[in-house]
């Protein structure tokens, strides 16, 4: 089982909200994890969006709109990226990442389609 | 503006070596842990290696352990990746990464005969 699992795709309409999940493997302590989120678009380098560990330990990337936010869902053992007010420019691949066992680990990535 | 610029990518034969470089600007490089991350064609992101700000601690992905060596020169604001015994599966764009910063353009490494 992968350390971080993301749904392969998600579709939503412009103006709607998109909730992306990053599920930690069973046995990994969600509370201890600082989860990073990156946006990848074809032909461009990955953009850092934000990191989230708790409401007192979070950071939005420089120049990233406030409609991107992070949180955790303890019941699902998952990190969450919420994109509010979806725009066509948000169509991209999104990857989560965390530090685990002396290594950074990336999720499997979610392709977001805005239609 | 905080940024990193990678260089050194090239076409190399299997079994060959290559040294990647990364120069940072706009921030105090010596204060930050740094990483190398790669993305193979059509694939997701894969973390490769990590180094603490002082250079005292290094970690590697199992896929490159024993073949790749990360290093840094804080006086030159530079991070390096020495890649030996290269394999076809090492073909990827390599990024020099500060995890709380958007990444540079990367440098392409192609391993092929």
Image: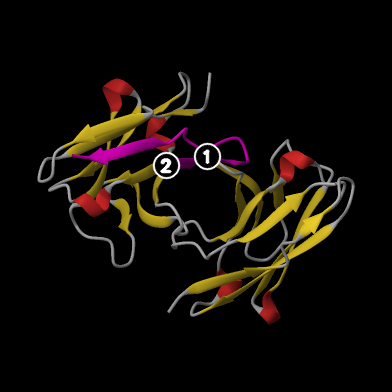
Chain ID at mark 1: B
Q: Which residue sits at x=40%, y=57%?
A: A47
Q: Which residue sits at x=85%, y=47%?
A: B113
Q: Which residue sits at x=73%, y=67%?
A: B8
Chain ID at mark 2: A
The reply to whether label 2 and label 1 mark residues of one chain is no
Measured as percent of width and height from the top left, residue A70 is found at: 27, 45
Label 2 belongs to which residue? A95
Residue B14 location, quadrant:
top right
Mark 2 is surrounded, within 10 Å at the Cα level, by few (under 14), some (14 to 19) or many (20 or more) other residues, namely many
Residue B102 location, quadrant:
bottom left
Residues in magenta, as a range: A97-115
Label 1 belongs to which residue? B44
In the picture, the disc for residue B68 is none
Measured as percent of width and height from the top left, residue B13 is found at: 86, 50
Evaluate if marks 2 and 1 touch, with contact meaning CB atoms under 8 Å apart.
Answer: yes
Figure check: A70 above or below A73 = below
Mark 1 is surrounded, within 10 Å at the Cα level, by few (under 14), some (14 to 19) or many (20 or more) other residues, namely some
């Amino acid at each position: 089982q992968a350390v971080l699992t993301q749904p392969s795709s998600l579709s939503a309409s412009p103006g709607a909200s998109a909730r992306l999940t990053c599920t930690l493997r069973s046995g990994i302590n969600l509370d201890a994890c600082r989860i990073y989120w990156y946006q990848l678009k074809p032909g461009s380098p990955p953009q850092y969006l934000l990191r989230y560990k708790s409401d007192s330990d979070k950071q939005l990337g420089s120049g990233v709109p406030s409609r991107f936010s992070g949180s955790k869902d303890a019941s699902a053992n998952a990190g969450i990226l919420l994109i509010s007010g979806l725009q066509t420019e948000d169509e991209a691949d999104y990857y989560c990442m965390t530090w685990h066992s002396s290594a950074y680990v990336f999720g499997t990535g979610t392709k977001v389609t805005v239609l | 503006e905080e940024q990193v610029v990678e260089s050194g990518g090239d076409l190399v034969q299997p079994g060959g070596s290559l040294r990647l470089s990364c120069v940072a600007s706009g921030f105090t490089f010596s204060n930050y842990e740094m990483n190398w991350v790669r993305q193979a064609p059509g694939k997701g992101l894969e973390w490769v290696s990590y180094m603490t700000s002082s250079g005292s601690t290094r970690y590697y992905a199992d896929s490159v352990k024993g073949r790749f060596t990360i290093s840094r020169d804080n006086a030159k604001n530079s991070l390096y990746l020495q890649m030996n015994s290269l394999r076809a599966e090492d073909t990827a764009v390599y990024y020099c990464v500060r995890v709380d910063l958007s990444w540079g353009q990367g440098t392409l490494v192609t391993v092929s005969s």
